[in-house]
Each structure stands twice: as structure tokens, then as C-alpha cells.
Amino acid sequence: MKALSIPDVLAEVAVLVRPHFGKGRPADYIPELADVPGGKFGMAVRTVAGEEHVIGDADEPFSAQSITKVFSLGLALNRMGDEVWTRVGKEPSGTPFNHLALLEAERGVPRNPFINAGALAVTDMLLDWTADPAALVRDFAGFLSDQALVIDEAVAASELAHAHQNRAIANLMRGHGTITHDPLDVVAAYCRQCALSMSCRQMSRAFLPLAAGGFSPVAQETIFPDRLTRRLNALLMTCGIYDSVGSFAYRVGLPAKSGVGGGIVAVVPGKAVVTVWSPELDRFGTSVVGTAALEAFAQLTSCSVL
Ligand code: GLU
């Protein structure tokens, strides 16, 4: 049987996901995100070899949210190495991304860098280095995607105005000494970082080092050592999709990171990055249509690390 081309696969995926619209809801705890039309759908594939294929709303910027946690972690690990792991763990949390009780039970050390507590700890580390971690993350992602990126200040302000839970998390960690800066500064920097706007096309370009042994074919530069690249992919596989990471791995079989803006980035090691965006979320905070799209993509292309 002749293998389908990537454009054929994307066209097929767009048909297969149709029944999944209307099953989830855009994030509403950040009011600015509640108004994003639920029917949006975009997908972008960028291969290590340089092919790029998109479908739907792949060039429309969406709120990257938790996906930015991969950029901030990459920056922190590149700069601080294993010292990062003295303040944050590497285990799946099995609890919602903004959970508080587990953090208290574990004396202020977050389970992993992708739940909010862990990402706040990483932002705190970046504050040792720059007064504006969000700009650092924006410029890093911009460098990797070869595009000037912007932070959506309305989304940042909207999240900050409702960031009571994240402030509680940051205060708890300050009490335990996991973070060292003013918790309010950490939360403000974190909310701005999460409000980075990127399109599927830009996201697939920016994540390419994770598919290419740490080298960015876009920036023509080695971004991460090969070993760190494999470790980042391991963290995505085990902790990248909130507390539904197991069923996501079962369905899709690829390291991936989701965000409550409705984006999901999946890495096909050695081959490509696939980004999908569709704002309606399941109860865990992951795009319903996005997950279905990646599941169909992995099946149609037999791309899976499992
Ligand atoms: N800024 C969001 C929050 O802290 C990120 C959550 C996410 O995308 O998972 O709630």
C-alpha cells in the first residue's frame, strides 16, 4: 500500500476530527481565553529534513500557556544543569496542574516542572538571571521559530487578575524555601510567560531541536546537548499532559506538551514536530480535538515512540 503524503494525512485528520467538536469547552478560568471561538482548528507539521505542511488555522496565534514551560525549563537546564532538580522533581503528579495539597504534603517541592508549582519554581530560577523571564522565554521561542513573537498583555492581565490559586502555590513554596523571590513577582512573570502568542507553524519550528537531537535546523544552531534533548522528551512523555498523561500516551504514543489555550505540541524523535490547536478542552485541560487529531496522525503515519 502506498504511504500517504503529509498533506494527504492532514486532510484526512481534518475529516476524522469533525465529530469531536463541541465535546469540550475553552478555558474559562482565564476570562480572556473564554471568548476564543471553539471551532478553531489548525495543525502544522515541520520535519527535521525541512518540509513544512499546515492545515486550517495553523497561522493564527493562540495562547501558548503551559507549552511555554518547555522553553523556560530548557533555558534553566541549559544554564543551571542538574541544580534545577534540587528544587523540582521529575515524576508525574497524578493531580490537576494547579493542585495544592500534594505540594504541601511534599514540603513545597513540586512533582515536576510542568505542573504550575514546578513551572513557578523554574520561573523563580530564571529571575536570578533576568528581571523579565517572560521576555527571555519570548525571545528564545522567537529565536527558535525565526519570528518576532509577542506576549498578549490582555491575556496576561486577565490571568493575573484571577491567579489566586497560583499565588497560593507560590506563597507555599516561598514558605518552604523552594522559591526565593517575592511570590507576587514570580506569579506575575509566570502569567506573562504563559500569555505568549504563537501559531502552530511557529510552535512546530520552535520545538524542532527536540526532534533533531538538540539541533535547530531553523536557527542552524545546537540548542540542547543530545542527552538533555532525550531527557526533555522523557519529561514530556511522563509529565507533559497533566494528569491524563497515561491515556494520552496510550492514544498518541508521542512525547507532547499541552496548554490550556488549546495547543498541543508532539515530538516525533528523529523525524518531525506536529502542533495542533483547537481551544475546546477536556476536564484535565487538554484540547479534545487536538488529542483526537494527534491520535489520528500517529495512526495514519505509524509515528510513535511506543
Ligand atoms: N497559565 C495557566 C495556569 O497557570 C497555565 C495552565 C496550563 O496551560 O496548563 O493556570
Image (cartoon, helix red, strand yellow):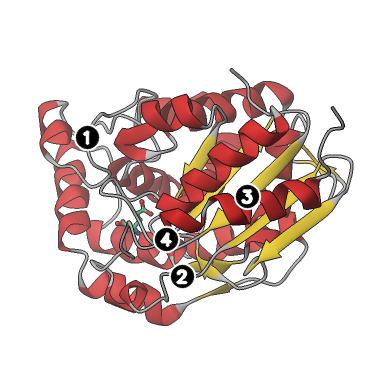
Q: Earlier in the sequence, mark 2 or mark 3?
A: 3
Q: Quadrant of residue 91?
A: top left
- Quickly name the residue at label 2: 39
Q: Between marks 2 and 1, how big is the CA–CA gap?
A: 28 Å
> Callout 4: helix, strand or loop?
loop
The furthest residue to the bottom: 154
| SS under mark 1 | loop
- Mark 1 vs 3, N-terminal side: 3
Q: Which residue is mark 4?
A: 21
Q: Mark 4 belongs to which amino acid?
A: Phe
Residue with the mark numbered 1: 95
Q: Which residue is mark 3?
A: 13
Quarter location, residue 35: bottom left
Quadrant showing the C terminus = top right
* Circles 2 and 4: CB atoms closer than 8 Å: yes
Rendered view: 155 above or below 187: below
Q: Is residue 219 left or right of residue 77?
A: right
Left or right of residue 191, residue 233 in this image: right
- Ligand 1 within 8 angstroms of badge 3 C-beta: no
Q: Who comes first in sequence, dot 4 or dot 3?
A: 3
Q: Residue furthest front?
A: 1
User: Which quarter of the figure is the N terminus placed in?
Assistant: top right
**Secondary-structure class at tag 3:** helix
Q: Amino acid at mark 2?
A: Gly
Q: Secondary structure at mark 2?
A: loop
Circle 2/circle 1 CB separation < 8 Å:
no
Q: Nearer the viewer, residue 71 or 136?
A: 71
Label 4 vs 1, first from the N-terminus: 4
* Nearer to us in this view, 34 or 154: 34
